[in-house]
Image (cartoon, helix red, strand yellow):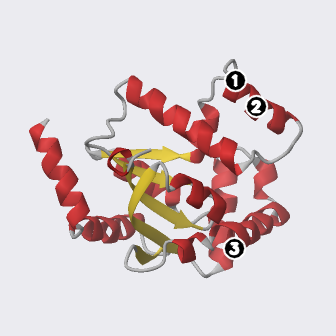
């Protein structure tokens, strides 16, 4: 994909329970922002397609979907949203959470997106993360996900696989935010930063013309 065709994007990175999904959904409800969580991609997958069948092949065996296939599935769904005029890549900013999940996915996604900012939702207190994850699992009636073993494994997986993404995007592109603040305060910090970015104002100015 050419440089001009890359989709402008903001990433939200954080451990499970840090509030990525909550903040992504709120941002996505604001015109000119389009929230896309990796979980949404898999849930909306058409298993009748060739790509969908590939996903089923791996998931039915309990295996992780390869990074290349994950990005292919993501790209196919983004194109589907574009074709249905739900997502408008020329005037919408993608808000991604859950993807990229590791450095290899971040490398592959360089051909598809232009990441102009990364928000790192920090929550160094593991007990607080575990409390949030347990509360969410019980609220959504996913009792297996409320076990201490599952929770600690998910936190450890994030630390080993996903957190290194911050090194990949290191530099002025990253803003650290205390995820233990109230959702309103976290959102305020994110919006304040976004409103200071030249890239945002360039895209916002384009939307006025449409």
SS type, badge 1: helix
Lower position in the chain sequence, tag 3 or tag 2: 2
Tell me where residue 205 appears, x and y as whole percent.
13, 50
Tell me where residue 178 appears, x and y as whole percent.
46, 78
Mark 1, other Cα within 10 Å: few <14 / some 14–19 / many ≥20:
few
Q: Residue furthest right?
A: 61
Q: Nearer the viewer, mark 3 or mark 1?
A: 1
Which mark, residue 54?
Answer: 2
Which mark, residue 159?
Answer: 3
Tell me: 151 left or right of 91. Answer: right
Task: Decide: is 90 above or below 129.
Answer: above
| Residue 93 in view here | yes
Q: Residue furthest left?
A: 209
Q: CA distance from mark 3 to mark 1?
A: 33 Å
User: In this view of the protein, which residue sits in the foreground, 78 or 36?
Assistant: 78
Q: Residue drawn at (81%, 50%), measured in percent from left and top? A: 144
Question: Are the two marked residues, 3 and 1, in contact with CB atoms closer than 8 angstroms?
Answer: no
Task: Decide: is 14 above or below 111.
Answer: below
């Amino acid at each position: 994909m050419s440089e001009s065709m890359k989709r402008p994007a903001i990433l939200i990175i954080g451990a499970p329970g840090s509030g990525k999904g909550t903040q992504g959904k709120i941002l996505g409800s604001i015109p000119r922002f389009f929230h896309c969580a990796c979980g949404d991609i898999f849930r909306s997958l058409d298993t009748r397609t060739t790509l969908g069948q590939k996903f089923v092949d791996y998931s039915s065996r309990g295996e992780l979907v390869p990074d290349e296939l994950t990005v292919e599935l993501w790209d196919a769904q983004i194109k589907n949203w574009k074709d249905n005029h739900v997502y408008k890549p020329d005037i919408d900013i993608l808000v991604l959470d859950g993807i990229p999940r590791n450095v290899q996915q971040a490398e592959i996604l360089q051909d598809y997106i232009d990441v102009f900012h990364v928000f790192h939702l920090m929550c160094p207190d593991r007990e607080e993360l575990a409390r949030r994850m347990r509360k969410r699992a019980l609220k959504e009636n996913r009792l297996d996900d409320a076990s201490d073993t599952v929770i600690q494994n998910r936190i450890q997986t994030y630390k080993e696989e996903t957190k290194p993404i911050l090194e990949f995007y290191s530099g002025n592109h990253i803003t650290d935010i205390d995820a233990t603040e109230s959702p309103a305060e976290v959102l305020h910090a994110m919006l304040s930063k976004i409103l200071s970015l030249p890239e945002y104002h360039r895209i916002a100015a384009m939307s006025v013309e449409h």
